[in-house]
Amino acid sequence: MQIKTALIMATEKLSACDDPSREASYLLSAVLKKDRSYLYAHGEDSLDAATLAQLNTWLTQRVAGKPLAYLVGEKAFWDDSFLVNESTLIPRPETECLIEAVLNLLPNHPSIHLADLGTGSGIIAIVLKKMRAAWQVVAVDCSPQALSVAKDNAKKIGVDITFLESDWLAALGAHSMDVLVSNPPYLAEDDAHLNGEIAFEPRDALVAGKDGLDAYRAILKDAKRVLKPKGYIFLEHGSTQAPALMALLEVHHFHVVASIPDQQQHPRILVGQLL
């Protein structure tokens, strides 16, 4: 089968997707390990049997709802492409707002020690280390599988980060950090967003109890022990959770410094400073 014919076939199979033509070209270019311009410059080239079989396997899985990022094993984020698999969440644009908040609100000072809690694929820790090379960054996760992906991403991007397997802050020393950053699970158990493609992502990285706040409770109850005096915490949250999370921050001796919206102007990031 020629490349141009395979593109037509793939587009037809993906007709229920939002942008079948784009997804078809994305999958075929990933199978071939070529950029998408190659497909159109070599449309009359023939695919070998193995390549066509891989494409058809991915098309079947995509039609069944499996996310593109899990099929091809990577996702673009910030200025790089990060490795992902079923043990990690797929990076989302909202998390770039969390990184921007850290970069905008903190000075570029070499004494800063920062921990990324629930690092997953490592995107937050890695981008912050890339942007602030002098900072000491620790990436924390309770999942060894996720940490393995994060380590591979750090090597791929070329940054030096400390990785720590820990249940939130349990393994961090007292008063060892200037900054805590986290995009923790924040969906409630009955959240409607758990349907569709998101069902393929690790549930324990998405769901945090009946109200979606359990991860914040776990982090905040130990944050005062780990942070240095006047330390900061940056938290990504759901679009309706800001009031409840502000109250939790105040209970745990934090002053709310800023509430920052995402690209759709939904409340998304809370910044607190230890009183």
Image (cartoon, helix red, strand yellow):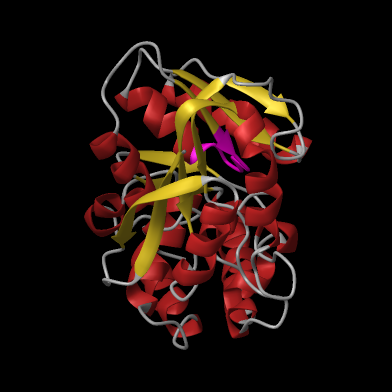
Figure disc tally: 0
Residue 147, percent from left and from top: 68, 33
Q: Which residue is nearer to you in this view: 147 or 185? A: 185
| Magenta stretch, main secondary structure class | loop
Is residue 119 visible to us here?
Answer: yes
Task: Using residue 210 as the reference point, say whether residue 31 is left or right of it.
Answer: left
| Foreground residue among 221 and 16 | 221
In magenta, the rendered stretch is: 116-123
x then y, percent, for residue 156: 48, 25
Examine the rendered structure and indicate whether residue 11 appears above or below residue 130. Answer: below
Q: Is residue 27 above or below residue 101?
A: below
Please say if 270 is above or below 99.
Answer: below
Residue sitting at x 61%, y 35%: 224
Q: Position of residue 145 (x, y in %)?
A: 75, 39
Residue 121 counted in the magenta span = yes
Quarter location, residue 7: bottom left
Instruction: From the viewer's side, name the closer residue of 158 and 128.
Output: 128
Residue 223 falls inside the magenta stretch: no
* Res 171 quadrant in image: top right
- Expressed as whole percent of the image width and height from the top left, the position of residue 58 reads 59, 64
Residue drawn at point x = 70 percent, y = 83 percent = 190
Residue 48 visible from this viewpoint: no
Residue under the image location 48 percent in, 61 percent down: 246
Is 150 on the left-hand or right-hand side of 156?
right
Q: Residue at x 36, y 24 (%)?
A: 130
